[in-house]
Image (tube, rainbow, N blue to C red):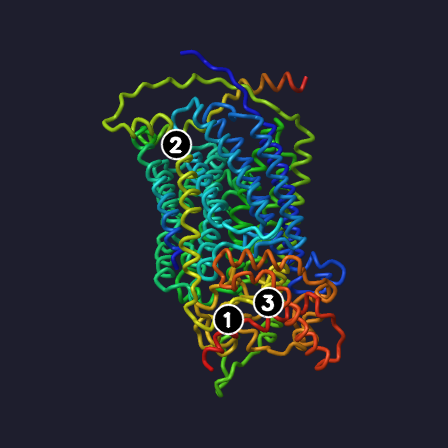
Amino acid sequence: MSVIIILLIVSILIAGGFLIGFLWSVKDGQFDDQQSPAQRMLFDNELKINQTNLKNTK
Amino acid sequence: MSLDKFYYDNKLPKFFAIACIFWGAVGMLLGVIAAFQLAFPVLNFSEYFPHLAFGRLRPVHTNAVIFAFVGNGIFTGVYYAIPRLLKTPMWSKKLGNIHFWGWQFIIVCAAVSLLMGFTTGKEYAELEWPIDILITLIWVVFGINMFATIITRRERHLYVAIWFFIASWVTVAMLHIVNSFEIPVSFMKSYSWYAGVQDALVQWWYGHNAVAFFLTTPYLGLMYYFLPKAANRPVYSYRLSIVHFWSLIFLYIWAGPHHLLYTALPDWAQSLGTAFSIMLILPSWGGMLNGLFTLRGAWDKVREDPVLKFFVVAVTCYGMSTFEGPMLSLKNVNAISHYSDWTVAHVHIGALGWNGFLTFGMMYWLIPKLFKTKLYSVKLAATHFWIGTLGILLYAIPMYWSAFRSYFMMKAFTPEGQLQYTFIDIVQTVTPFYIIRAVGGTIFLIGVFIMIYNLIKTAKQGSFLATEEAEAPALEKEYRAPSNSIWHSFIERKPILLLVLSLVVVGIGGVIELVPTFLVKENIPTIASVKPYTPLELQGRDIYIREGCYNCHSQMIRPFRYEVKRYGEYSKAGEFVYDHPFQWGSKRTGPDLAREGINQPSVAWHFDHMMEPTLTSPGSVMPSYPSLYENDIDVASTNSKIHAMRKMGVPYPDGYEAEANNDLMKQAETIANELRTGKKVKIASNKEIIAMIAYLKRLGTDINLEKK
């Protein structure tokens, strides 16, 4: 069952990586604002799209 | 503040979407064929095409649906959502193209090679080593493109969907590398570096996480982008999305052993898997509830919008299968479900419901957007929705039913203490359920064709928008005072890249160093009488793997009275130390073969059975294997196979490579003679069937020797 050691190392590596990612993201302020990100993703620049489209469709 | 002007590319999302739908239809069609084969074995067409037998077709179906359908679905969403979330185009069009064509090339290679019988024999990781390497390369290309896009972003905040994509990429890379550790024997043939119990553990650590990080987390990312977009309202709770993301990825990695409950895997490892699997219900349901609650106050939209209909059922199916998952990880429930059709129903609730419906919803939303038009027919889409839902139900319910019926038949004893039903009795009982299941799958597939028609019509009535212009302020180069420690400021400058690179480097390095040291030592047998396979048996085993026998036959007897009575002494960990790869299987459409050598020692029986299974077992649904009687054993490979085995610590004597074929011939001649004298059939001793019989006769016999 020594393979469990390999799996443990790999799993802990992944989990550790996630932990670093988590700590970084918290420190970076990724989660400071928990309202606007959810709203912001709803808005794309629709206006520009239409102009490009006019050119494309001739 | 100046505004940057830039362009989103819609070509790659379109390509990926087309590939996703195309491979989806192919993969599901293969699934339907395979489902009918289980009810009507004549559909295997074994006499004409040995390539299309169930054992070879089923891996093509699973691989196509997972890696081609869902894979391309993920990439469609990623290439569409990431630029818009980060206000920047994908970093490199060239890498994107390489990614797209490379992935499709892998899919074609996979399909062809699996049908030709090139397989590692490990479920969902069947592809042989050259394709494994190709997958790694393309995955890295994808990763570079994604992370470079993230680094060059114009939006400092990473939306939760992107977190899901990042975690998926990192973990899949790791899983693939660790599980694909194999020693090449020749081009397109390799042996898993791990053996027996170890191989099983690695395989299901991979297998479960493939479900987790290929079928679940990236699709949660898609859910978090496309569901709010389609409903045009923000996700119910952004905080919940963050909390459930981090807890989900931390818990998932440890759940793998729940695939090996009651097997020869050490008990503590089983319990560990069970404990983590039960915990998983919380983050999983966090995701489901967050998805469903996003529609709070918008349920009137669900009545009209087919996109939302699909999303609602997809998320509900996700919730159902992630409730079922922890339940199936309880040992007492698993005793019923393992090796049965329950597992098949469970994965199809996930695959058809969660992955399928989420993809369909995404396509119905995305294709009109890409073509600047409205969906051609909302009515057809609604029809697709109802047909698809009916298909799922018709698929799943018969499978649950057959699972319970077969379980109760399997463990039924007569008052005299004998097993009440033979295995064939059970096969005969569940076959009608297989027919209903196949019909359910067919209905689901018809829905997909309706969608394809609808989407083509949609594309035709619109005009494709190849690029979209957008503008956003450049991301300010934010100067941050160095933190108190040096490494911290370093990490903050190039965080993700560093994270990923270090993980990959350390992972590969660590694995390469550790594996041989640990594993070769482990192969010192703990049961003295367990010996390596003879060269002929080894060749037979490779034929067994090639034909995908493991898709229907397990080689692992669990310690239950009704299993021991039916199949013989329960399996011990020490019996599998030379099994590269392990062949424990996960489904018993046919009986367990772990002690086949004891249960069926007659060479004549096997000879007849492989030629026409119904000769020896009336009512069997197994395909026949006439090609085994024509093909010659590949003796040229014996040398390199023995050599590879020896490298992995299998104790063949030094220099045995040279003598192996002599022993092989001798043993083959003995078996052929037995057939000639006992059965009065003429068979050359160099035919594959001889090797196959040799292997089957050996199975599970070593432990009996010990008793004598």
> Earlier along the polypeptide chain: callout 3 or callout 2?
2
How far separated are the C-alphas under marks 3 and 1? Answer: 33 Å
Q: Which residue in the structure is indicated by mark 1?
A: B407
Disc 1 residue crowd, few under 14, some 14–19, many 20+, Cα 10 Å = some
Rendering coords of residue B267 (x, y %): 36, 64
**Chain for disc number 2:** B
How far separated are the C-alphas under marks 2 and 1? Answer: 51 Å
> Earlier along the polypeptide chain: callout 2 or callout 1?
1
Q: Is mark 1 on a helix, strand or loop?
A: helix
| Disc 3 and disc 2 on one polypeptide chain | yes
Q: Which residue in the structure is indicated by mark 3?
A: B537
B655 lies left or right of B561: right
Rendering coords of residue B321 (x, y %): 46, 53
Residue name at image x 65 percent, y 55 percent: B117
Disc nearest the viewer among 3 and 2:
3
Q: Which residue in the structure is indicated by mark 2?
A: B498
A51 lies left or right of B499: right
Please name the amino acid that badge 2 sits on.
Answer: Leu
**Chain for disc number 1:** B
Q: What element carries label 3?
A: helix
Rendering coords of residue B308 (x, y %): 52, 40
